[in-house]
Amino acid sequence: MKYVISLLITMNAWATPIRVFHEGEARYAEGIKTTMKFEYSLPDDLIHIEQVKSCSELVVRGKLDLCLKSNGDLLVVSVDREFVSESLKIFRAP
């Protein structure tokens, strides 16, 4: 059972490699997601939005994790440069 749960968590991490966390209202994070979709032609399924209490408390390390602070600052929490340069290069750059 532990193996199945681990496998599901791993599959979920690969399913949404770009995560946008936000402290404040979700509509601003949705705006970032919309920009990524239309400006870079990223599929909706690659981008996940999640609310957090504080960006400074995030310890996640995904492929590309961004956090939108309540004051509007956008922070890069973690980035896998190989993922960005190799996997995302198939999508259109502005």
Image (tube, helix red, strand yellow):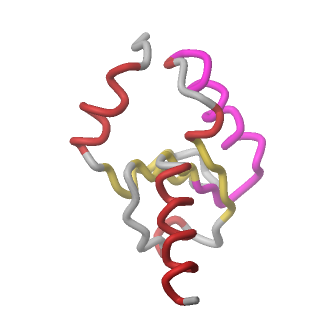
Q: What residue is rendered at 23% in x and 43% in y?
A: 81
The residue furthest bottom is: 2
Q: Quadrant of the N terminus?
A: bottom right
Q: Is residue 38 magenta?
A: yes
Q: Who is closer to the viewer here, 21 or 86?
A: 86
Residue 49 appears left or right of 79? right
Give the side of residue 20 with respect to residue 57, left or right.
right
Quadrant including the C terminus? top left
> Between 28 and 15, which is closer to the camera in this rendering?
15
Is 26 a magenta residue? yes
Q: Is residue 70 above or below residue 73?
A: below
Q: Majority secondary structure of the magenta segment?
A: helix
Q: Quadrant of residue 4?
A: bottom right
Q: Residue at x 63, y 55 (%)?
A: 22
Q: How many marks?
A: 0
Indicate the position of residue 67 as horizontal and vertical percent values.
52, 54
Q: What's the magenta region?
A: 21-39
User: What is the x, y in percent for residue 17?
Assistant: 47, 49
Give the image location of residue 34, x and y in percent: 66, 27
Picture coordinates of residue 92, whole percent (x, y): 43, 13
